[in-house]
Structure formats: C-alpha cells, structure tokens
Image (cartoon, rainbow, N blue to C red):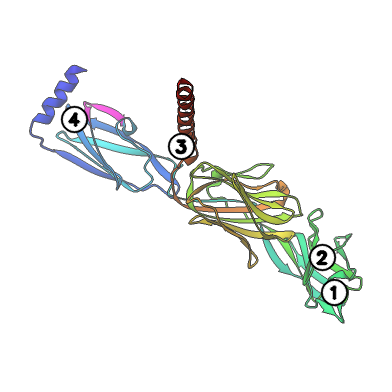
Amino acid sequence: MRRGVLLLALLLSLPWVSAWNATFQFHPSPGQELDDILINYTSECSSWVFGTFDDGSLVQDFAFPVNGSGSVDLQDYLDMGVPSNSTLYLESNCELNVTVHPRYGIYMHPPEVRALSTEFRLVKIPFKKTGEGRFEIETPWKLVAVYLESHTIYDNGTYVSNLPLRVEVSWENQSVLKTPEGRGTYYWVDVSDWKPRGRVILKLSGRRAKYIDSAYGYALVPHREKRQWWLVYNYKEGYYFGDGRPWREILIKLEFLWKGEDFTLASFVTQEEEKLSLKVEGGRVCLEGPHLKKCGSRIPRGALKLTVGFQSGYLWVLGGGNVYFNEYTGTEAAALINLLWGVPKDDRYSVEIHAKDSSYWKPKKRMEIGLAEILGGSALVISLLALYLSRKH
C-alpha cells in the first residue's frame, strides 16, 4: 500500500505527457440517473489513467493504474447517482483500448416529479332525447353515473325538486328502477353497481319528469398509460404517494365516484413535521391540523373530477368550475402522503400528481419543545432557589 502511494506521488511529480485521451458523454432519460460506469481496458504498457467526470454541477478527478487488461467501476472512485447529462474525460501516457458501459437506475430524488396511476378515465357522454321523459344512448363503455338536467327550478310557485321522480334504466334485457339524488337544476343516478353499456334507455316517471330537459352519463374509458407508477401505490384504503420530500408546489388531479362516505381527500406532513389532513365530512371539505380546523363548501355526490393544489402555503380544491376550499396553511412546503383514503378501490379511477420545487425539513416543533424544556427547567431552578432564600431569611 505504501509503495503504491509512493509510486503515485512519484508519477504526479513527473512531467505528464498524454499519449492517449478519450471523451465519453452520457444522457440519462427522464426519470433516470447514472449510477455507475464500467470501464474495460487493454493496455500495451504499465501506466496510469487520469480521468475527469463533469456532471454540470460538480467536477471530480480520479486515477487508476493499468497493466494489460482489466476493468474499473467508477462508483468506487466517484460520487455517482447523476440525473443530468455528464462527460467523462480519460487520458494516459500509454495507448489504450477502452470501452465504457453506463448503468442507469431510477432517479429517486428528482427536482420535479410527475406520477400517474390510471386504469380508467371518467368521460362525459350525452344521451339523446327520444320522447317525453325518454333518453337513449349507444355506448361501448360502462356507465357509473347518469345525470338529469332541468332548466326549471320553480313552476307556479312549486319547487320542482320537491316533486316525485323515478328513473328506469334498461340495457341488454336488464333494468333497474332508481330515485335520483340532487336538488336544483341537476340530479344524479348511481348505476355503478350494474355499469350498464350498449344501448341504454332512460324512462322517467313522476310529476318532475316533464321538467327534465337533457341527460348525460359518465363512462369508464380504459386508459393504459403508466408513467412513474412506482411513486403511486393503489392500496385497498386509498392511494399512497411514495416520494416523501416536502414540496413547495403540488398539483393533484383525481377522478372517482363519491357516494357520500366520509374520507380523507389528501393528507400532508408540513416541513415543520406537523400533519395536515384535508377531509370530507358530511360532504364538506375541511382542513384539520394540530391547532386548526377550517372548512370550505360541500362537494356533490356522484362522478367527480377534482383538482387539489398547494402553492406558496395555500391549499385549494377545485372541481367543475367551483372552489370547494381555499385556505392558507402557514407552511411553505409539505410532503404528500395519502389520497382518497377511505374511498372504495372500485370507485377510484385515476390520480395524477405533479410536484415541483422540493424543500427541506424544518423541525420547529422539536426546537420549541427543547426550548420549553430548558425554560421550564430554568424556571423550576429559580423557583426552588427563591424558596430556599425565603426560608433562610
């Protein structure tokens, strides 16, 4: 070992004449990182190879001896795990025959993350009105919800939503009779237990039937694209996001069927290591934390496409042109943990996550606890000292 060090020192002190050099470039694909470079070489003489590895932000130098044939793993010499384009420069005073073999892996800590877990997309498709209180559609896709629209809210002082309405849904020699839910100008029918397709017919009955002007459905259209699926885990209870870093900007798009159960829309851990839960309780969107509870408006039952956003400390929920929640959280960054926790797996269809500008943890809570303990201990000592002095005098 000592001889090797002395030999290297001697070589470094001698004038260097490069007889051979080569340059190699590496270009990881999006979502990949360069984990290692295997160098295979054949040398006609005994010499040293000096190298420089430049990844755009860090330049690293290294050297290794060559004599005959052999191989070198650069991960033994360099800090690897490089997601950016990089350049390897080699030189020696001996002619070499060299081949390089890069090894790429998954980049687990990119500055920006896009994740997708999708089996179906919720697609709105219209029914055709074929008669008084009758609507039809021909669809190859399974329907999970049917909607009825009315342009009439009051008629001669009568609130139309209070009038009776029944809907018979028939398809492929099957039929089911349902009472629509909803108030105002639209009503929905849950058909997710049957998922009719093909020629689907709606027959309306009841005093409210004549006020229904149009109908449409939400169908499950298969979506086969998978992108960075390893970051989103679809468990029985809900989705789990696998990147636990706090982010300053998060955008989440969700598609699911909601039948009225309480659930957690999204949960976070702030960079101060406090948990925030965005819950739906009784239909109302509420944010719960260690020292806060803020509520927004109610979401409608049925097929939903919601967007949850976090940016500059603000957390919001949008859907169908409505703002269901918008509040300041008091934290600059947060780690996303769970999504749609409590919604049945068969009713969850798609989640897209785009997170940008990763941050770092700031465990203020621990510092505050430590300071409180110090101050509390000091107060106790002062109190005991005062008691001792008062008794002494």
Residue density around tag 4, few if under 14, some if 14–19, many if 20 or more, within 10 Å:
some
Vertical placement of 230 versus 124: above or below? above
| Mark number displayed over residue 159 | 1
Query: Which residue is situated farthest in the top direction here?
Result: 2
**Mark closer to the chain start, 4 or 2:** 4
Neighbours of disc 1 within 10 Å: few (<14), some (14-19), many (20+): some
Amino acid type at mark 4: Trp
Of the two numbered discs 1 and 3 in the rendering, the one whose residue sits closer to the viewer: 3
* Discs 4, 3 touching: Cβ within 8 Å: no
Residue 130 lies in what quarter of the image? Answer: bottom right
Numbered tag placed on residue 200 in the rendering = 2
Crowding at mark 3 (Cα within 10 Å: few <14, some 14-19, many 20+): few
Give, as a three-letter code, the residue at label 2.
Val
Q: Residues within 10 Å of mark 2 (few under 14, many from 20)?
A: some
Depth check, front residue: 46 or 259: 259
Q: x, y percentage for residue 8?
A: 16, 26
Residue 131: in sight, yes or no?
no
In the image, 70 versus 36, the foreground residue is 36
Separation of residues labelled 4 and 3 (CA atoms)? 52 Å
Magenta-colored stretch includes residue 65: yes
Q: How far apart are marks 4 and 2 (CA)?
A: 78 Å
Between 182 and 220, the residue placed more toward the observer is 182
Disc 1 to disc 4, C-alpha distance? 91 Å
